Image (cartoon, rainbow, N blue to C red):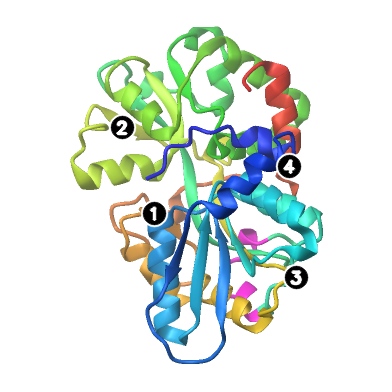
């Protein structure tokens, strides 16, 4: 599990240097070599999802099709900005993210070609933008991890906006520099509006302790350093499935009720318009949210939600149908605006 320590936010606004961007494109590549049938060449996947999960999925794709996949691994906005910087010279065939705002960045630069309609049809419509330029294949729910000895269920906030109230000062934690938390902020903007989101961020600046990644937030809650922290669900479920060492003193609060705090972040996949292997790239995207790819995801240790129609999640997870997330048009999740608001609030 990667720790989200680097400030993906600065990359989101295009404020880092080209040197920072080029580093992630050359330093961490891995290739799926399973299977040798077919002569479709090798696809280049710019991967911002968890490397271990995506390796399982592309290996399954290679076994199925014989098409090899070379993975270049990095962070959401690092790779998104790299694609935009590379333009027509980009070697990428497919781009995969953990959170959707980075997909919107590439889409805004007209970097994608349309996803095959049969691929779009494999997931419910809320898991793809209306323009059909990319599509979701996994989801993660926003949750509040809380220390069970310090907080009782009756004391938990009814909305994520409550965390900006004075009574939460020094009691909560966030990983503000990570793309995960910034995606959550983008949902607050989409659901509540820019002005209300700015006021909320101002309150978080006063109240929250800042940590380096979701794991660090969860550990701080578990150790009693803070009473609660905003994370994605799968960090807790993964730790519980392993030893529980960093989560046994905690429980999860799902906001529900279409609250911005119940935001369901979508991991996206799209075919680059400049890809020289359009047919094979479309096949990869279709595999990711198709039945076989979704089963690989569900059977893995990732503990993320498969979102394909008819796909079954790990039984340990709270059912997807019970999460009650807000309705958000994915193309409106604006990473650059979020960075601006968070910088104004002093959180970046």
Residue 296: x, y in percent? 37, 69
Q: Can you say whether 265 is above or below 218 in the image?
A: below
Span of residues in magenta: 118-128
Q: Which of marks 3 and 2 is in front?
A: 3
Q: Which residue, given by chain and number where applicable, does mark 4 sit on?
A: 334
Q: Which residue, given by chain and number where applicable, does mark 3 sit on?
A: 274
- Outermost residue to the left: 243
Q: Which residue, given by chain and number where applicable, does mark 2 sit on?
A: 251
Residue 122 belongs to the span the image colors magenta: yes
Q: Is mark 1 on a helix, strand or loop?
A: loop
Q: Can you say whether 112 is above or below 221 in the image?
A: below
Q: Can you say whether 179 is above or below 64 in the image?
A: above
- Please say if the residues under marks 3 and 4 sit with CB atoms less than 8 Å apart: no
User: Quarter holding the C terminus?
Assistant: top right
Front-most of residues 248 and 336: 336
Residue 239: x, y in percent? 27, 41
């Amino acid at each position: 599990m990667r720790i989200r320590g680097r400030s993906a936010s600065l990359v989101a606004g295009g404020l880092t240097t080209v040197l920072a961007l080029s580093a992630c494109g050359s330093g961490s590549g891995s290739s799926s070599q399973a299977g040798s049938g077919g002569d479709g060449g090798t696809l280049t996947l710019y991967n911002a999802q968890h490397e271990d999960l995506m390796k399982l999925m592309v290996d399954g794709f290679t076994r199925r099709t014989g098409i090899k996949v070379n993975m270049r691994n990095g962070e959401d906005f690092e790779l998104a900005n790299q694609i935009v910087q590379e333009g027509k010279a980009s070697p990428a065939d497919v781009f995969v993210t953990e959170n959707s705002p980075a997909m919107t960045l590439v889409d805004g630069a007209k970097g994608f070609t349309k996803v095959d309609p049969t691929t779009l049809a494999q997931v419910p419509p809320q898991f793809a933008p209306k323009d059909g330029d990319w599509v979701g294949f996994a989801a993660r729910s926003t949750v509040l991890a809380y220390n069970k000895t310090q907080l009782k269920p009756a004391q938990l906030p009814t909305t994520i906006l409550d965390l900006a109230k004075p009574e939460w000062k020094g009691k909560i934690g966030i990983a503000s520099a990570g793309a995960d938390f910034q995606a959550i902020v983008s949902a607050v903007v989409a659901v509540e509006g820019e002005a209300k989101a700015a006021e909320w961020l101002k309150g978080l600046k006063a109240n929250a302790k800042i940590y380096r990644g979701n794991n660090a937030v969860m550990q701080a809650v578990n150790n009693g350093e803070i009473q609660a922290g905003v994370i994605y669900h799968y960090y807790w479920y993964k730790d519980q499935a392993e030893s529980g060492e960093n989560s046994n003193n905690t429980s999860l609060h799902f906001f529900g009720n279409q609250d911005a705090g119940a935001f369901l972040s979508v991991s996206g996949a799209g075919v680059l318009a400049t890809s020289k292997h359009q047919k094979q790239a479309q096949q990869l995207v279709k595999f990711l949210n198709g039945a076989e790819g979704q089963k690989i995801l569900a059977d893995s240790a990732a503990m993320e939600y498969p979102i394909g129609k008819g796909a079954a999640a790990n039984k340990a997870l709270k059912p997807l149908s019970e999460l009650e997330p807000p309705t958000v048009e994915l193309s409106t999740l604006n990473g650059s605006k979020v960075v601006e608001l968070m910088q104004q609030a002093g959180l970046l």
